[in-house]
Image (spheres, grey):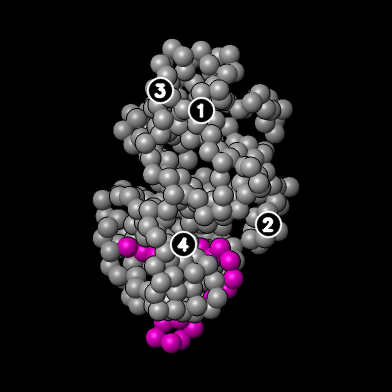
Amino acid sequence: MQPMKLKTACKDYIWGGNRLRLEYGQQSDADRIAESWMLSAHPDGPSVIENGDYKGLTLQEYLQKAGKSVLGTDCARFPDFPVLIKLIDAKDKLSIQVHPDDAYAREHGGGFGKTEMWYILDCEPGAGLYYGFDHEISKEEFARRINDGTLEEVLHRAEVHPGDMFFIKAGTLHAIGAGILLAEVQQNSNLTYRIYDYGRLGKDGKPRELHIEQAKDVTQLKPADCPVGPQGSREEKNGYSRILLASCPIFTVYDMEVKEAELNADEKSFHSLICLDGKADLLKEGNPVLSMKKGESVFVPAGYGSYTVKGNCRLLHTTV
């Protein structure tokens, strides 16, 4: 049992830029990198193990060989790998969209629903996002505004700044605006109902697919009632500091500033370490195991026990 560095899966959606390539070292043959799936057992973009006995396997293949115990006892209630973590570079604005909950997804053959968290890493001045509605509207008004292109008039727009956190419950209408770089921690789902896409054409020259009827079924037509802002204050520890960004039954996420941190991947949950800045070494009983730098992702199996992260880095630390 050992920590594993992961090769990420990159997506070249039409709204993406190149900051993930230039600043975070992500690699792709595509012209742009809109998303980098940093921790993923999803078939649409699996992570691949880069070191150790399981080198070359996808994360899902590793789980099939090693068994679900490497996820931890707190993951036993999930039939599959529970989370998916991305870095997202929105050079242009994303479509206005919504995700269903688990019950609706199961009924309509879509696997899991999707609750997610956005953590703003950087943004252009004045950049913002849509997050629920300014006021409650009726289903009839929702349908009319989709049809006549006036939906944006009743959406809640929030200007964003580095360090902001937005928790997006399933059913909350949302859209990331242009000029935003963020980390997203979400349920292990790629199920999105696109409502409005500003009349854009896809790479095939055709309008991008919309999912209006499904969106009408699942969208909460009122102001969002989800947490905004980190859910804790920054804690100063011996050798590091951290701030709780979000905690829910699916994931718990911290932003950590580390010089030397003693961590413990006990039997309850795996650890995901994504290096957002700087570099560090991971050590076990004082011995080096692997190194990490900005833009790299490490999976630490549940039951690995105590280990040390030593260096000068900023980490997104996620458990279940």
Which residue bears the numbered disc 2?
21
Q: CA distance from mark 4 to mark 2?
A: 22 Å
Dominant SS in magenta:
strand
Disc on res. 136: 3
**Amino acid at dot 2:** Arg
Question: Magenta span covers which residues?
Answer: 269-289
Which residue bears the numbered disc 4?
255
User: Residue 300 in magenta?
Assistant: no
**Amino acid at dot 1:** Leu
Disc on res. 211: none
User: How far from the left and from the top, in percent, is residue 221?
Assistant: 41, 24
- Crowding around mark 2 (Cα neighbors within 10 Å: few <14, some 14 to 19, many 20+) is some
Q: CA distance from mark 3 to mark 4?
A: 34 Å
Label 2: element kind: helix
Q: CA distance from mark 1 to mark 2?
A: 32 Å
User: How far from the left and from the top, in percent, is residue 296?
Assistant: 56, 65
User: How far from the left and from the top, in percent, is residue 20?
Assistant: 65, 55
